[in-house]
Amino acid sequence: MKLSKTLFKQYSRCSRVSALDDLYKKRLKTSASIFGDDEQDDFIELLYTMFDEETGDDLIEVIDKQMEALLPYYNKLEEEAMKIATDVFGGPIHYSLKTTDQKLFTYQSKDHQYYCYLDGYLEKENDIYIFEVKATTSKKFQELGPMIKKQHYPLFKKKDNVYHLTHYPEMDAKNFQRAFEKLFDRYGAIGRYVFDMAIEKMIVEEAMKQSSLPLKNIHYYLVVLNSSYVFDGASENGEPVYHEINHEKLVDFIELNPIIEEWQTKIHSIKKVLEEDITLLDLKTIPIGRFCERKKMSKCPFVPTCWEKALVDGSILEYLDHHFGFTDEFGLKHETLDLLNQGYYTLDSIPKRWLERPNNLIQRECFEAKQEYVDIDKIKKGVKTLSYPLYHLDFESFPSPLPRFRGEKPYAQSVFQYSLHIEKAPFKCDKDCDHTEYLALDFTDRREELIQQMIRDIDLSKGGTVIVYNKSFEHTRIKEFANMFPEYREPLAKINDHMFDLLDLVKTRSGLYLDLGFSEEESKQINYYDNRLHGSFSIKKVLPIFSDLTYHGLPVANGTEAIATYAKFKYLPTEDIEFLRRDLKQYCKQDTWAMVVVLWGLLRRVQKS
Ligand code: SF4
């Protein structure tokens, strides 16, 4: 079998994944039944978790629209990274955006052929430099290390654009070890990149051994975006130019040699198990686990199959803070995943006495009695802190891996749109007449225009409240605006000072309710719950409870589609952009109208009593 680095990572998650993939690929190749009669029922049941029973749509390979929209930026990153690598390490570096034109290493092990393509390859007389470009930032590497007496001890230190592992005399101490272990957690935020490079090392070096290539010193580098890089806005022919600014380059290099060397024994034993699994192709159900990475972009494609029972409506995964686990009457802690593997699937499958968190008890009551929960007193007192007019505000932003405009860093959330509904007095807001908005005309830098209009639209001279849903996003964006455009600092700070999070009314926020005189326990307790929330307070989950409004059927129906739609502005003539702008406006308007409707729904609930 041919095994790429990606397949190595997928197939080594668990003993079942290669068997499921085999089944899935066979089904893709044929519409006819591929199994004998005895097995058929079991297999068909599995296939229905992979392909829609009625339409036959593929449920495993779902297109990621955001990923598609950002692809040109990832490609550009690779190009820029290799230019900078040439500056730092010399050249010529062998690289290409076309994977099959990249430097290939391949070797045979028993019946399997392992191979990997390299993002960048530089060979010198005695040394080889291997580069793996990742669309992440250096921040997580800068931050890795213990905090001792308020002092941070970073495990990686940067010298001339390259981060190297540092050794401290106290390296054996527990807190250093805890940080160090993160480099060996293949599913962790940092360990995943190290694991990837460790597999690469195995393939490269085994391939070199097999082809009897001369031994050279091989240096392995991750190449990531430099989180300290602040773009100065330079451009040529309308395209950004990322030159060095204040001694910072667009990318940083992380030297991983000592760590991936330590990984090798483990990599070889993972490979051995993987080869056994490929031979057995055992479809037998196994316990689910963290290795499925259910909520991550890197999740196993067979989550819909293996997690089918765990993801039912009313699953124990809906319990708020379920990641802290549950404690039984003997003081024994049970992790949520263990409970699922033991067959505790639904909210009411766990003994009630195991629910120590008051919020979980509220959820349980709602589930069993099929009724909603409303803390009238807290909502009423929370609402009293609002002063009218209310400005219901929502931003849409583009998370570009490469900064596009002056003052932005890699992965800046570049705001291109807002919607605003103005509620002059309680229940006095017309969906169309009391609405205003801003949407960038094209893909160029329109931030200042947006800020100017927002400051005009939100008139706080006679008081008022700016309502947002999940405050940290809008609050941070406005703070960034104030830093990038200091001439508007004062009015922007005023908007932030008057900002109120509607989520605090729907869910709760301890700080707000402690200030309003509630006890610590009361402040932490949720204000509202309904089973239809399924453990989530996102506006898209809350809205259907208070209205018939729906996002289904909108041409742009969620944040990811908004990003993908705006990304198209770059490539289309103005007249075609107009259609997309209409769709984006409709979507963002729905978001702020949803906030109005949710607030009114809550007010009606508490006014009734
Ligand atoms: S979803 Fe989890 S258990 Fe199922 S195949 Fe994937 S990794 Fe294995």
Image (spheres, grey):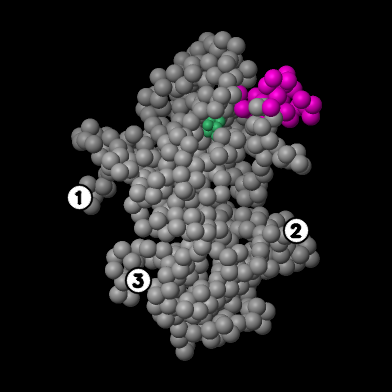
Q: Which residues are magenta?
A: 19-41
Determine contact: label 1, label 2, CB under 8 Å: no
Q: How many marks?
A: 3
Residue 572 numbered mark, or none = 2
Q: Which residue is mark 1?
A: 149
Q: Residue furthest bottom?
A: 462
Q: Nearer the viewer, residue 154 or 513?
A: 513
Secondary structure, magenta segment, majority class: helix
**Position of residue 531 in the picture relative to residue 186 (left or right):** right
Q: Nearer the viewer, residue 412 or 533?
A: 533
**Tag 3's secondary structure?**
helix
Which of pointers 1 and 3 indicates the residue nearer the eye? 3
Residue 125 numbered mark, or none = none
Q: Earlier in the sequence, mark 2 or mark 3?
A: 3
Q: Nearer the viewer, residue 59 or 35?
A: 35
Q: Is residue 343 above or below residue 426?
A: above
Q: Which amino acid lies under the numbered mark 3 shown in the image of this protein?
A: Tyr
Q: Is residue 30 magenta?
A: yes
**Tag 2's secondary structure?**
loop
Please tell me in which quadrant of the rendered image residue 20 appears.
top right
- The image shows residue 200 at horizontal and vertical percentages of 51, 26
Which residue does the image show at 37% across and 63% down from the upper left? Answer: 525
Q: Is residue 131 visible?
A: no
- The image shows residue 569 at horizontal and vertical percentages of 70, 60
- The image shows residue 358 at horizontal and vertical percentages of 36, 58
Q: Nearer the viewer, residue 380 or 387?
A: 380
Q: CA distance from mark 1 to mark 3?
A: 32 Å
Q: Which amino acid lies under the numbered mark 2 shown in the image of this protein?
A: Leu
